[in-house]
Image: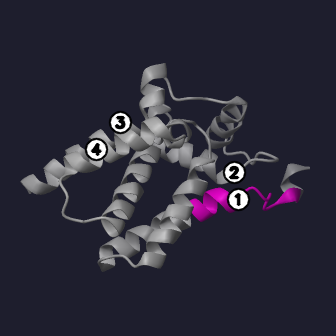
Amino acid sequence: MQQKLSSGLWYGLFTLILIWPALYNMFPLVTPDSGTYIHSGLALSIPGDRPWTYGIFLLLTSWGVSPWFPIFWQGFFCAWLLVQLGKKCIISSLPHSFWAGILLIISCCTAAAWYTAQLMADSFTGFMLLAILLLYLGPEDRASRIQLHLLWIICQVQEYSKLDPIPILRE
């Protein structure tokens, strides 16, 4: 029980490391497209040229209360995928502090944190590629395999929902 609590706290720290640009900004990073996503989620409408499922993701994860919750989920997805990849490619028994250092380097030296901290569907493309790579490398256990498949499906839906499913309803 205490190990799971400790692991949960570490993943909370990992998430904060990967959303540091939003924390520094004191608000999730937004672009002109962010408003479309927020509106499509809250109004349950289908935008013309954006993934409509990201609006649903924002609605479900924000609970209609705060844009911080979706950013935390995106940070958690990114942290979990990167740590799983690191454990698969390096050594799985390294301490959490090692992974915190690796994620700190990644978040400071790449654009991963900047994409993760945005209210945009773009980060799900990277998450999908990481999930595919981890599935190719072979997950350690059945639970990880199921989690990777679920995350991959979420990413697929985010990525390929750009096509308007029901054009007649928009007329």
Of labels 1 and 3, the one closer to you = 3
Tell me whether the residue at label 1 lies in contact with that at label 3, contact meaning CB atoms closer than 8 angstroms. no
Q: Dot 2, crowdedness within 10 Å: few (<14), some or many (≥20)?
A: many
- Dot label at residue 107: none
Of labels 4 and 1, the one closer to you = 4
Q: Dot 4, crowdedness within 10 Å: few (<14), some or many (≥20)?
A: many
Of labels 3 and 4, the one closer to you = 4
Kind of residue indicated by mark 1: Ser
Q: CA distance from mark 2 to mark 1?
A: 6 Å
- Dot label at residue 100: 4
Upstream in sequence: badge 1 or badge 3: 3
Q: CA distance from mark 1 to mark 3?
A: 28 Å
Which residue does the image show at 38% across and 50% down from the upper left? 79
Residue that mark 3 sits on: 16
Q: CA distance from mark 3 to mark 4?
A: 10 Å
Q: Residue furthest right?
A: 171
Element marked by disc 1:
loop
Q: Nearer the viewer, residue 106 or 15?
A: 106
Q: Dot 3, crowdedness within 10 Å: few (<14), some or many (≥20)?
A: many
Residue that mark 1 sits on: 161
Which residue does the image show at 70% across and 51% down from the upper left? 51
Which residue does the image show at 34% across and 57% down from the upper left? 83
Whether residue 72 sits left or right of residue 28 in the image: it is left
Note whether residue 14 is visible. Answer: yes
Element marked by disc 3:
helix
Q: Position of residue 58 (x, y in %)?
A: 55, 43
Upstream in sequence: badge 2 or badge 3: 3
Q: Which residues are magenta?
A: 154-167
- Indicate how the structure is coloured in the image: one colour
